Amino acid sequence: MKSIYNEIRAGSREFLKNWWQYLTLFVSVDLVIQLVVIPVFRFITTFVLQEGEIPFVSYQNVVTIVSEHPLVVVCLLLELLALLLVIYWQFAIVLLGVRDIRQGKGGVRQLLLESGRSLRQLRFASLAILLGYFVLVIPFADLVFRTPLLSKVQIPAFILDYMTRSSLLLTILIVFYTVMLVLGVRFLLALPLMVYREQRPKLALPNSWRLTRGGRWWPLLLRLIIIGLLSGAVMVVSYGVMVGFQLILDMLPGKLALASAILNLSLVQLLSEFFSVWTGVLAIGILTRPVATFTSQPGPGRVSRGTKRALVIAVSLVSLVTLFNNGLYLTEELRRPVTISHRGVAEENGVQNTIPALKKTHQLHPDYVEMDVHETKDHQFVVMHDENLKELAGVNKAPYQLTLKQLTHLTAHENGYRAKIASFDDYLRTADRLHQKLLIEVKTTPHDSSGMLKNFDRRYGTTILRHHDQVQSLDYSVVKGLKKLDPQLTVLYIQPYNFTYPNTAADGYSMEYSTLTHDFINLAHLQHKQVAAWTVNDTDVMQQMMYNHVDGIITDNLADLNDAIKTYESRQSYAQRILNYIMVIPSNQEFEP
């Protein structure tokens, strides 16, 4: 442990000698990615999809895109290859920049030439290897350099939640993550080898494996973990001091409290960036020690007058934008999200999608109750989520295999409760008597009748409009079909993963929360479309979603959501708003110009 302490101490001293250059390097690369690369890739993806008349990309239409739009597939694959090159470039330029700063040499021009040379060594076959490599090192790369490009690659939370419900699936998940951890650590040195020694991936990967064999990977991982914990602890203490200081400043009269809060929040952001860069530089020092030897100079390298002038202009612009955004944040009116009870239950107070649970949940006053409907064998509609009745009702049948009468005679069991399966007509009438608005998810299967949507709209469209209910579906053909049949209906398109921003006929989106970004929400709002997050059961994530200005939150824990909203709305003082910002800001939040 003493050697680790000495390494961190020596690395910190070196960082403090050149902290301004390190901060400039990391922030510049991040701004280029945020303000140039991501918008360009978004524009290209949108343009390609629009030219191919493809409204969205999802697992539902991948086969259709591949079979009917080969040119679009080629364009998207080329875009993926370009994205891999950009990801490699941003890591290369950071690694090379850290080396140049330590050696007190080079400049922006030299750094760009070096990173370009590093890119040119890659071959087409290398890109496939890079794709797998980046997937492996994502958990560790985030510690070195927090990039929004890699942060988008993740397994949605609902899949992880599903896999933890079965001992077999949980075992598979643990084995998967263990293998990913081992491979990720063993291949961590491949990127420094590619950048510093100009080795191609097929050579760098086995060399990284060799350099970390015999248990030599463990000290490497331990050092990275300690650096991460130390950085987190320092940030927590610093934030605590600043929030406490703002509590005192809030007592200042007039606009002085606001002005001090803007400056204080800006300082919080600067410290956050400072500590992140410090962590990154220390981590790079740990990673590069086995593959590169740096000769540190007594001071920073010489910076040209033109570079200094450009830096002053850039810093001034970023500072002005930051101060303006912070002023807006500290003075904006907090918007309360719509509360939506998932499957009509709250805190496990009954059987999902049943009338007794609806009545109990209504007492907690949700804005909407989300529920699910399936078409039955006799073309009626039953309130049911699952495509098979075995888990809830003990019958190994699907809703389309039974008539409505047969279905409503079955008893469902869940959370220690029993209740009859409900017809949609009865559920809708009960909700009407309670004055409870519904968010109705239309479930589909290949066995649905050809006139299912017309039948649904004919029977319920007018009632849904009168009750101010909303409809949603995972099946885009339902969204498109209902909007064509009845344009006045509010229909949301459910997305389990944020592949790209879609251009659909939907009135809004119901998005799985773990892949939902502030950027997606802003783009949806620009088109006057609402965004609901599902299924959010953790209070910290609830506040995160509120900070990102989602329009609705779908949850199993309605009481927790109501408490989280009260807590969020009660944070009206500037100190509390700064604390709220610190508590809920995502670690990989995209830049907000």
Image (cartoon, rainbow, N blue to C red):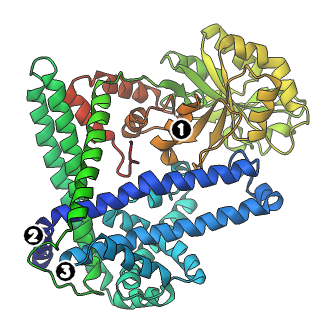
The image quadrant that residue 303 belongs to is bottom left
Q: CA distance from mark 3 to mark 2?
A: 15 Å
**Up/down of 111 relative to 519, above or below:** below
Q: Is residue 366 left or right of residue 216?
A: right
Which mark lies nearer to you, 2 or 1?
1
In the drawing, what numbered circle is on residue 13? 2
Amino acid type of the residue that numbered disc 2 sits on in the rendered structure? Arg
Viewer-side residue, 491 vs 145 = 145
**Up/down of 286 relative to 576, above or below:** below
Report the residue that reaches farthest toward the front.
306
Amino acid type of the residue that numbered disc 3 sits on in the rendered structure? Gln
Viewer-side residue, 373 vs 139 = 139
Viewer-side residue, 377 vs 474 = 474
Q: Earlier in the sequence, mark 1 or mark 3?
A: 3
- At x 48%, y 87%, the residue is 200
Characterize the local packing of mark 3: few (<14), some (14-19) or many (20 or more) Cα atoms within 10 angstroms. some
Give the residue pinned by disc 1: 523
Question: Where residue 415 sits in the image (x, y, percent)?
Answer: 55, 35
Question: Where residue 402 sits in the image (x, y, percent)?
Answer: 85, 35
State the quadrant of the N terminus.
bottom left
Q: Earlier in the sequence, mark 3 or mark 2?
A: 2
Amino acid type of the residue that numbered disc 1 sits on in the rendered structure? Leu
Q: In terms of secondary structure, where does tag 1 sit?
A: helix
Q: In terms of secondary structure, where does tag 3 sit?
A: helix
Residue 45 visible to the viewer: yes
Give the residue pinned by disc 3: 103
- At x 54%, y 32%, the residue is 526
